[in-house]
Image: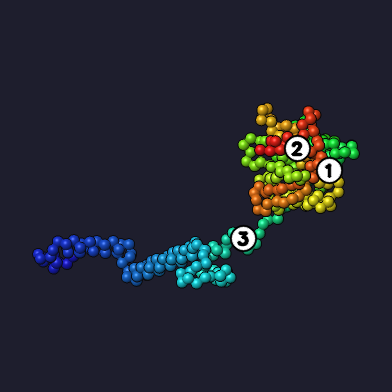
Amino acid sequence: MSNQAAKDNKVIPYLLLREAKIARNKDKLERLGLNNPSTTKSSSDSSATRTSRSRSAAHEKSSRSLVATTRSSRRVRNGTPVTKSEVQNLPVSAIGAKEFKSKKRQRSEENNSSKPKAVVRSEAKPGTTRATYVDAKKVLYGHFDYPLFIGRRLANTGKAAVVEHANFMCGNEVGISFNKYSGVCEFQNDVLFLWVNMNTPDADIKNKFVVDNDKAQMTWYGGSRMREESPVIQKLISIGQGAKTGKNPDSCGIILFYRMYNLAKRVFEPYTCLGRLSYDSHEIGSQPIRFVWNLLDFDILKQATESGGSCIINEIMERNL
């Protein structure tokens, strides 16, 4: 502080304090060796350079992040569509490096097509009905020259009793496994059994028998998982049409087994064989798929009677609810 300023009584206290702080700071800088103007300028310039570089790097990183995380779209701000080939030809700096590192599988046009998938048929396992050969004529005739088992009720209940009867008549091993939840039992050759329940209370779908003069037909519904392209449905149609035109050999065919629900006892009665079926029609696109079958052995059924004298087909028509 100068003597002139100290003697001047008009100097305000603020200026005196300011000059005192400047002198103090200057003294500290001299002791630290930082009072050289060239050193201060160099340090200031390097600091500014570092700050500028940091801001530039942050801006570039923000720009990359913004572009890389932008939602993929075929629309741009000016409304011009962008093709896939144009996007792939852009430089990395334009769309961000993260897009090129993505391993997400692109959806092909084939995957987006509405074509139905081909149904792959599984291989038949040994010891199952699908791997077992049966003769349809022997199932119906047994060892006789007359179809003794058409219109005859089996002694035991359940689908297993029907399969055991077929294996016994054909000389096969007993204990062959099958899908007891399916409405169709398929064998190795062109033989299929259809299962039908009647008089079942609270059933969502009911099979109907219709008799017109000397012709009898029955409606049958496939399972919930069966589609028109299912192998077993295609096999039913093929064999049924062959039976209609008389092209099937006697060893092949579709055989119908039905069982009645006993309301008084609340149990199913044993299955009864209703003979062979031929294809009449099916409803395309229905779910479950609906068939109409012709009963080829209707004349035999009209003469078939139980041990008590009751006619099988009359009993069916009476309970055809």
Residue wearing tag 3: 112
* Residue closer to the observer: 269 or 183: 269
Instruction: Tell me the quadrant of the picture where the N terminus can be found.
Output: bottom left
Type of amino acid under label 3: Asn
Which element is circle 2 on?
helix
Q: CA distance from mark 2 to mark 1?
A: 21 Å
Type of amino acid under label 2: Ile
- 2 or 3: tag closer to the N-terminus: 3
- 2 or 1: tag closer to the N-terminus: 1
Q: Which of the numbered marks, if any, corresponds to residue 313?
A: 2
Nearest to the eye among marks 3 and 1: give it.
Answer: 1
Q: Residue at x 87, y 38 (%)?
A: 146
Nearest to the eye among marks 2 and 1: give it.
Answer: 2
Residue wearing tag 1: 136
Q: CA distance from mark 2 to mark 3?
A: 52 Å
Is 42 rendered above or below residue 259? below
* Residue closer to the observer: 238 or 207: 207
Q: On the rendered structure, is 192 left or right of 262?
A: right
Q: Which of the numbered marks, if any, corresponds to residue 83?
A: none
Q: Residue at x 79, y 38 (%)?
A: 302
**Outermost residue, left direction?**
9
Nearest to the eye among marks 2 and 3: give it.
Answer: 2
Q: On the rendered structure, is 43 left or right of 115?
A: left
- 3 or 1: tag closer to the N-terminus: 3
Residue 100 on image: x %, y %? 57, 64
* Residue closer to the observer: 110 or 44: 110
State if disc 1 and disc 3 touch (CB < 8 Å). Answer: no
Residue 13 on image: x %, y %? 14, 61
Instruction: Tell me the quadrant of the picture where the C terminus can be found.
Output: top right
Q: Residues within 10 Å of mark 3 (few under 14, many from 20)?
A: few
